[in-house]
Amino acid sequence: MRTLIEKYKGIHPGIILVRLLSQKGISQRPFALSIAEHPQTINAITKGRRKLNTALALKIEKKLNLEEGTLALLQTYFDIKEEKSKVEQNTPNLNLLRNSLFWDTDISKIDWQNQSIAIIKRVFERGNASEKEEIKRFYNSEKIKEALSEGIRKPYTVYKNKENA
């Protein structure tokens, strides 16, 4: 079990189930009926649209002669990966940023990566010390330097372009 877990850690167990059924030459519908499950449930799991609960994981493991807990652990590792990706979605701690700092937009809809330069400029122009610290924590120092120096370069770039026109 350890090698299977390590090999497929973070992958939805439905993908593993498809491979196992394919290796054994079993179709999803007959397999679902053989373990007294709805075929739609097994199909949703194999497509990654549904989580594999523990009870169903145990039924599948027993029928496919897998070590008990293998698929349930894979589901847990997949859930952990999903949760980590949510946390790492590159959103600063919004509790540390005042909504009034972003009065002209819905703070929950800000694209923190694509609008980074405008965000950094705004926070450094109008933010308090804790807001600036949060932005420093969230963005790397190079990104902050780039954003803060953008205001200095931009007028020069515009002037240079006008001169060339």
Image: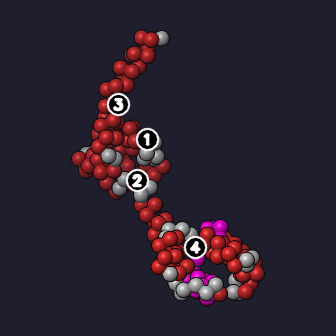
Determine the secondary structure under disc 4: helix
Lower sequence index among marks 1 and 4? 4
Mark in front: 1 vs 4: 4
Q: Position of residue 121 (x, y in %)?
A: 34, 37
Checking the image for residue 13, the label placed there is 4
| Nearest to N terminus: mark 4 or mark 3 | 4
Task: Classify mark 4: residues with Cα within 10 Å, few (<14), some (14-19) or many (20+).
Answer: many
Q: CA distance from mark 1 to mark 4?
A: 36 Å
Label annotation for residue 91: 2
Q: Which residue is mark 1?
A: 115
Residue at 31% x, 54% y: name it.
Answer: 96
- Span colored in magenta: 46-62
Compute the Cα span from label 3 to label 2. 22 Å
Q: Depth check: 150 or 26 in front?
A: 26
Q: Is residue 17 magenta?
A: no
Q: Residue at x 43, y 16 (%)?
A: 161
Q: Are marks 1 and 2 in contact (CB under 8 Å)?
A: no
Vertical order, 53 against 149 (above or below)? below
